């Protein structure tokens, strides 16, 4: 089902499309999508464990995590010397269509098959 949005030509200038640009650029990479998927499945994950999960050196992983973090798609919490990352579900849900959102959503809708 395609949802049609009303067109308000005069309001288009008021929308700040640049704030979405970094978010969609961050999504346009297979490794970053894999990182987001793993965070969705596992919840909060230490960066030390994430290197093994996505089979990536820590330096490359840090690069991808920074892009996702700057785009607001993930959240970071520092505990001692370690950083833990998790998906920012409200930001992901705001950006993605309901169909694509099912890939990154972990709630009753996906378990019951009602997501899409």
Image: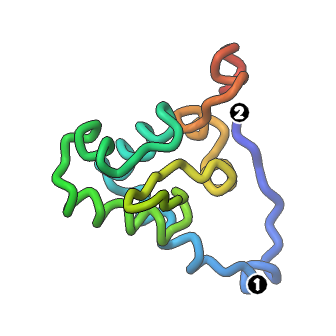
* Lateral position of residue 4 relative to residue 21, left or right: right
Q: Looking at the picture, how far across and down is residue 5, in whole percent? A: 78, 56
Rendered location of residue 34, percent (x, y): 35, 42
Q: Quadrant of the N terminus?
A: top right
Residue 27, given in percent of the width and then of the height, sits at 43, 56
Q: Residues within 10 Å of mark 2 (few under 14, many from 20)?
A: few
Residue at the far top: name it.
Answer: 112
Query: Which residue is at 44% across, 46% downward?
Result: 36
- State the CA–CA distance, disc 1 to disc 2: 28 Å
* 107 relative to 79, above or below: above
Decide which of tag 1 and tag 2 comes sooner along the chain: 2
**Foreground residue among 85 and 31:** 85
- Residue of label 1: 14
Mark whose residue sits in front, 1 or 2: 1
Q: Nearer the viewer, residue 49 or 18?
A: 49
Up-down relation of residue 101 to residue 64 (above or below):
above
Q: Dot 2: what SS?
A: loop
Q: Residue at x 52, y 34 (%)?
A: 103
Q: Compared to 114, does 101 lie above or below? A: below
Q: Nearer the viewer, residue 112 or 60?
A: 60
> Residues at badges 1 and 2 in contact (C-beta under 8 Å)?
no
Name the residue at 81% across, 80% down. Answer: 11
Crowd tier of the residue under label 1, counting other residues whose Cα lies within 10 Å: few below 14, some 14–19, many 20 or above: few
Identify the residue at image location x=51%, y=68%. 71
Q: Say what secondary structure mark 1 lies in.
A: loop
Pointer 2 residue: 1
Colouring of the image? rainbow
């Amino acid at each position: 089902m395609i949802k049609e949005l009303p067109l308000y030509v005069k309001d288009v200038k008021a929308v700040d499309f640049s704030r979405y640009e970094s978010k969609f650029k961050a999504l346009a990479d297979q490794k970053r999508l894999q990182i987001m998927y793993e965070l969705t499945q596992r919840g909060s994950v230490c960066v030390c464990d994430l290197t093994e999960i996505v089979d990536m050196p820590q330096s490359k992983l840090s690069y991808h995590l920074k892009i996702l973090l700057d785009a607001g798609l993930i959240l970071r919490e520092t505990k001692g010397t370690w950083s833990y990352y998790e998906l920012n579900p409200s930001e992901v849900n705001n950006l993605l269509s309901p169909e694509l959102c099912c890939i990154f959503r972990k709630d009753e809708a996906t378990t019951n098959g009602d997501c899409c």
